[in-house]
């Protein structure tokens, strides 16, 4: 292995060689003989950002990781050209890689919390990178660490350098990770989904930091599934699918006027305020059989809310004896056939609100009414018989299924025996549910573990529909899905709502999804509702500063030249 | 074109799925289990001679083609005795493991599903019992009940039970707080139905594998007690008793201790390996 290729550190004398900072030609990556990247080529100019977008399994991550020699265990990486920062990195051994990584190429991963050593203060993590690459002498190291943290927009760097990752917020961790990636001042930064695990407003700060780095002349290779992130940062976009490049070009052209149907479908799948009432996925509507289930006496036909909450307060005890107010004076009302969106960051109390609505958690103050009758505050045995009227779909459907059960068992268990007394009737009901959510009946015999993310979520929706509910609580129900799958599930939810007059309590951190679906939106922060109204209203100057930031983060993608949409 | 193979340094993002073909370890374990099973059920197939046949002309013989494991101080063939002792050792191990898990499940059920005060009290009892060294607990019972094979089963079972009780309790708690139990609650199912359909099956399923693991552990504990003279009395060829009998000759006839000791190790390892194989087969992994 040619470890002799790297002998010197780049110094001031190392004038940047002309030409692109990253050149890849005919890159192929295979695992155990199975090729996952089929000969892709791209180049990134100095001081620009190249974005690789695609859905899970498109090969985007593996391609980018090949640039830093971290394609994965057993990966066979082959290329005609693989040049990063003027270095031919083909045939690099682990030692050569270690010398270049962090020095010439910085690597920022998705999840800072697992990328940083949990028991080491972040300052020392960064100092370690400085030491390994011999950037500054020992005496100047601490000052350099603080400088790097300051550059990464970490407030109070002296304090933060002494803290461990667990003591920092997700956004601060991510910035500390970027600071450590920048320690040796690399020319090229490979960022693999750098903002995916972050809240929208924090995401904006991290993007701003990356934009600053680009302005300072660094080359950024950005991997993302999130088109709004890409729109914000990228100069050049590469769309990947199935290990091949589907389309590439300047960001404005690819995101604004895509030539390829795949790119077009991908962009149309992104929900937002402008997509209300439109179908997001090219898939046709699933024909909905008439519901043979029981119908309650036309719920909410008189205009009264099916679900209403008044002045909800929920405290959780803290380990130090204090109390955390997770939900503070939250109220709402939800009418049949309508959707109430609750949007907010992690820790804003939106999930606790959902659990209070489901009466899985008891409120400290306030009340929830279902069909105008008391719901919270009852003993569970009085509630049990009415639970069928309100059901739930959670973010992680897999963990909500008994791991021993097949899809059929999961669904049979959810069909109320009172309405379907015979085994044959229950089976018929399950077959009907599976058809309603657009699943192939063949999945019935399989375990949820073996299904794709979208299929699992369809099973979860089928289960939620089994008792023929009036209200469905959807807690981040599409957040873990790829954008095209998310589009299909959102379309399905709209179809089901129209067919059965369902009321949705839709919880999400994604304002785009919320404004696509909701008739009324609550914006939550620190347990309180800071703003509410019709989604359109939120965009005509929101009064609350937090909502303004949220809306601004969504705007980035929306301000692109409008795409022509196909409305089936 | 150059080929680079990256060494396993990246996180397990793209780790290939575990190969499904049987590993040699599993085959070996299976073979050992079959041999042990035959020795326990039909020892005469492996060692047709009488385990108590005395041959004063050939005392303390080292291992040889005629006496594979050598002979003891009164000329009994050690191989025959080890084979014929397998049944008793295994019975004691399986019995003790059964007692241990039964007790553990009962304690854990009381500690998790019983009404508040009962659960808390049981929890404390488990903690106190767990603080006792296993051997001490077992010794206590043997001294109360008197040394006998049946006593050994009970004593070892009670001795190792607290550790398993804590494990089963954690399993039950984990299952009770799982999202699928919450999903069942949200569907309006009754508590008894949720416990019967979700909590118990998911919490107790790992016990199938744990049972095999604990057989190995119990055999070792039972042998220890026999070795201390608190288990099976000397004429029997239970493996712990063989160890005890050979102890006096350890300097002149080491095989009397080493070979039965190896048999105990082989049984414990086989049971443990079997348990692990069962565990990875039954648990829904990634």
Image (spheres, grey):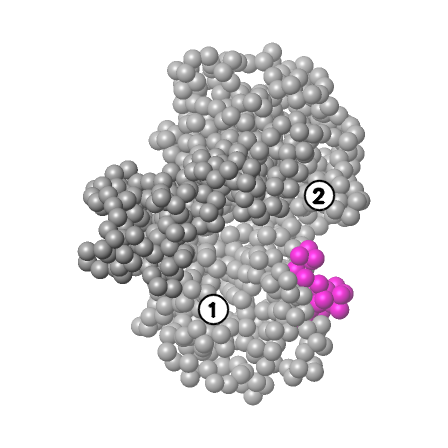
Magenta-span inclusion, residue B282? no
Which residue in the protein does label 2 denote?
Answer: A348
Q: How packed is label 2: few (under 14 Cα within 10 Å), some, or many (20 or more)?
A: many
Is residue B180 visible from the viewing direction of this image?
Answer: no
> Which chain contains the residue that carries disc 1?
A
**Where is residue A491 drawn, in percent x and y?**
50, 34
User: Which of A96 and A552 lies nearest the eye of the viewer?
Assistant: A96
Residue beneath the point at 22% across and 60% down: B64
- Which residues make up the magenta segment? A148-169
Which picture quadrant has residue A327?
Answer: top right
Closer to the camera, A236 or A80?
A80
Give the percent coordinates (x, y) of residue A454.
46, 39
Regarding mark 2 in the picture, which secondary structure is present there? Answer: loop
Residue A56 in the image: above or below residue A154: above
Q: Is residue A158 magenta?
A: yes
x 59%, y 81%: residue: A134
Vertical side of A72 occupied by A89: above or below: below
Q: Is residue A57 left or right of residue A366?
A: left
Nearest the camera: A528 or A188? A528
> Of the numbered discs in the image, which one, if any, rests on residue A68?
1
The answer for which chain carries disc 2 is: A
Per the image, label 1 sits on a secondary structure element best described as: loop
In the image, residue B239 lies at what x, y percent?
37, 48
The quadrant in which residue A351 appears is top right
Residue at (60, 71) in percent of width and height: A182
Q: In the picture shown, does residue A562 fall above or below A61? A: above
What residue is rendered at 62% in x and 60% in y? Answer: A118
């Amino acid at each position: 292995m040619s470890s002799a290729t790297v002998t010197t550190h780049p110094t001031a004398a190392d004038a940047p060689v002309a030409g692109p900072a990253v050149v890849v030609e005919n890159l192929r990556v295979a695992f155990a003989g199975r090729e996952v990247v089929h000969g892709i080529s791209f180049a990134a100019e100095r001081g620009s950002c190249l974005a690789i977008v695609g859905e899970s399994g498109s090969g985007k991550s593996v391609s980018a990781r090949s640039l830093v020699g971290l394609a994965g265990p057993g990966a066979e990486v082959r290329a005609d050209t693989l040049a990063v920062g003027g270095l031919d990195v083909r045939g690099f051994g682990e030692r050569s890689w270690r010398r270049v990584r962090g020095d010439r190429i910085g690597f920022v991963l998705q999840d800072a919390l697992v990328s940083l050593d949990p028991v080491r203060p972040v300052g020392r993590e960064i100092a370690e990178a400085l030491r390994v690459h011999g950037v500054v002498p020992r005496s100047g190291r601490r000052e350099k660490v603080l400088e790097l943290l300051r550059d990464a927009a970490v407030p109070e760097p002296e304090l933060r350098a002494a803290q461990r990752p667990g003591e920092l917020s997700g956004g601060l961790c991510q910035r500390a990770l970027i600071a450590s990636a920048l320690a040796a001042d690399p020319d090229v930064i490979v960022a693999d989904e750098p903002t995916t695990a972050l809240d929208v407003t924090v995401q904006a700060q991290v993007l701003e930091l990356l934009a600053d780095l680009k302005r300072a002349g660094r080359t950024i290779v950005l991997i993302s599934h999130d088109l709004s992130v890409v729109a914000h940062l990228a100069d050049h976009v590469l769309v990947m699918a199935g290990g091949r490049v589907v389309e590439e070009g300047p960001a404005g052209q690819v995101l604004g006027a895509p030539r390829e149907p795949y790119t077009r479908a991908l962009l149309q799948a992104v929900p937002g305020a402008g997509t209300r009432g439109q179908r997001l996925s090219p898939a046709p509507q699933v024909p909905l059989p008439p519901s043979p289930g029981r119908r309650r006496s036309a719920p909410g036909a008189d205009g009264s809310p099916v679900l209403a909450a008044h002045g909800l307060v929920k405290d959780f005890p803290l380990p130090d004896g204090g109390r955390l107010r997770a939900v503070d004076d939250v109220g709402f009302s939800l009418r049949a056939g309508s959707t109430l969106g609750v949007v907010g960051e992690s820790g804003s109390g939106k999930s606790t609100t959902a659990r209070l609505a489901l009466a899985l958690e008891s409120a400290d103050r306030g009340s929830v009414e279902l069909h105008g009758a008391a719901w919270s505050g009852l003993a569970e045995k009085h509630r049990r018989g009415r639970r069928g009227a309100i059901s739930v779909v959670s973010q992680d459907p897999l963990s909500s299924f008994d791991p021993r059960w097949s899809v059929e068992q999961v669904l049979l268990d959810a069909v109320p025996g009172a309405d379907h007394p015979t085994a044959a009737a229950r089976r018929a009901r399950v077959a009907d549910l599976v058809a309603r959510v657009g699943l192939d009946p063949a999945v019935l015999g399989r375990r949820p573990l073996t299904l794709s993310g979208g299929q699992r979520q369809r099973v979860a929706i089928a289960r939620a529909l089994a008792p023929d509910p009036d209200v469905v609580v959807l807690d981040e129900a599409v957040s873990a899905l790829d954008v095209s799958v998310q589009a299909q599930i959102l379309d399905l939810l709209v179809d089901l709502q129209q067919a059965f007059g369902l009321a949705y309590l839709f919880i999400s951190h994604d304002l785009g999804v919320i404004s696509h679906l909701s008739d009324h939106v609550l914006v939550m922060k620190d347990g309180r509702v800071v703003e509410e109204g019709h989604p359109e209203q939120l965009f005509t100057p929101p009064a609350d500063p937090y909502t303004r930031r949220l809306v601004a983060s969504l705007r980035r993608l929306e301000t692109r030249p409008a795409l022509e949409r196909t409305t089936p | 074109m150059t080929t680079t193979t990256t060494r396993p340094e990246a996180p397990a993002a793209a780790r290939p799925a575990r190969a499904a073909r049987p590993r040699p370890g599993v085959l070996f374990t299976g073979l050992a289990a079959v041999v042990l099973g035959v020795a326990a059920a039909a020892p005469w197939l492996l060692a047709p001679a009488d385990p108590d046949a005395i041959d004063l002309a050939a005392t303390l013989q080292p291992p040889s083609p005629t006496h594979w494991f050598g002979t003891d101080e009164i000329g009994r063939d050690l191989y025959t005795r080890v084979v014929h002792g397998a049944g008793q050792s295994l019975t004691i191990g399986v019995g003790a493991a059964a007692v241990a898990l039964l007790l553990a499940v009962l304690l854990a059920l009381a500690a998790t599903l019983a009404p508040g005060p009962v659960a808390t009290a049981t929890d404390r009892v488990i903690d106190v019992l767990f603080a006792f060294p296993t051997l001490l607990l077992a010794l206590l019972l043997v001294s109360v009940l008197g040394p006998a094979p049946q006593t050994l089963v009970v004593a070892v079972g009670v001795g190792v039970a607290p550790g398993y009780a804590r494990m089963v309790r954690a399993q039950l708690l984990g299952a009770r707080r799982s999202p699928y139990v919450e999903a069942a609650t949200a569907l309006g199912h009754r508590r008894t139905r949720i416990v019967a359909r979700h909590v118990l099956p998911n919490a107790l399923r790992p016990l199938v594998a744990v049972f095999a693991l604990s057989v190995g552990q119990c055999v070792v504990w039972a042998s220890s007690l026999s070795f201390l003279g608190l288990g099976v009395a000397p004429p029997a060829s239970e493996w712990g008793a063989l160890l005890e009998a050979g102890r006096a000759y350890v300097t002149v006839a080491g095989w009397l201790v080493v070979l039965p000791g190896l048999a105990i190790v082989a049984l414990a390892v086989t049971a443990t390996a079997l348990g692990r194989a069962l565990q990875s087969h039954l648990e829904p992994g990634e």
